[in-house]
Image: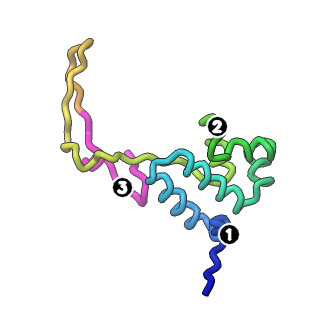
Amino acid sequence: MTIKISDLDVSEYLNDEKSIAAYLSAIVEEGDPKLLLAAISDVAKARGMSKVAFDSGLGRESLYKALNPNAKPRFDTILRVLSSLGLQIGFSSITANNLSRKTSFHLKKSKRSVQLRHPGSAAMKKTGNKIKL
C-alpha cells in the first residue's frame, strides 16, 4: 500500500482575519525570522500578491523578493506589507510574571530613584490581547 503525501498550502486556509492573526501569532512564538517571513508570504499569497504589492506600494517582484525566507528585508518594508494586509504588530512582556509590582532602580548620572510600574498594576487595564495605560 502506497501512501501519497502532498504539500500543504497554508494560504488556502487563511480566509479570515482571526485565522490569519492566530497563524502569525503562533509563528512569532517560534522565534525564527525566516519562518515569520514565510508566514507573512503565506498571508500575502492568501490575500493576493498583486493586491498586497499595490496596497503596500511595492512592485510585485519586489514583494516576492522581500518575503523570500532567505531575504533580509528592511523593517519599514515589513511594516508596509503588514499594514497592507490589515495587520499590526503588538508587544507583550515575556518576563511579566518575574517582576514585582514596583521595581526601583537608580540612574548613575542623575542619582535619582525611578519607580517602574509592572504591567499587572492597577494603572493598567488589560483588554483583549492589548494592554492600555
The amino acid marked with disc number 2 is: Pro
- Give x and y (percent) for residue 61: 80, 44
Q: CA distance from mark 1 to mark 2?
A: 25 Å
At 67% from the left and 46% from the top, the residue drawn is: 68
Q: Is residue 15 visible?
A: no
Q: Secondary structure at mark 1?
A: helix
The amino acid marked with disc number 3 is: Lys
Q: Earlier in the sequence, mark 1 or mark 3?
A: 1
Q: Badge 1 local density, few (<14 within 10 Å), some, or many (20+)?
A: few
Q: Nearer the viewer, residue 114 or 16?
A: 16
Residue at mark 3:
126
Q: Earlier in the sequence, mark 1 or mark 2?
A: 1
At 76% from the left and 41% from the top, the residue drawn is: 62
Q: Residue lying farthest bottom?
A: 1
Q: Nearer the viewer, residue 77 or 10?
A: 10
Residue at mark 2:
73
Marks 1 and 3: which is nearer the front? Answer: 1
The amino acid marked with disc number 1 is: Glu
Residue at mark 1:
12
Q: Secondary structure at mark 2?
A: loop
Q: Is residue 55 left or right of residue 71?
A: right
Q: Quadrant of the C terminus?
A: top left
Evaluate if marks 1 and 3 touch, with contact meaning CB atoms under 8 Å apart: no
Q: Which residues are magenta?
A: 116-133
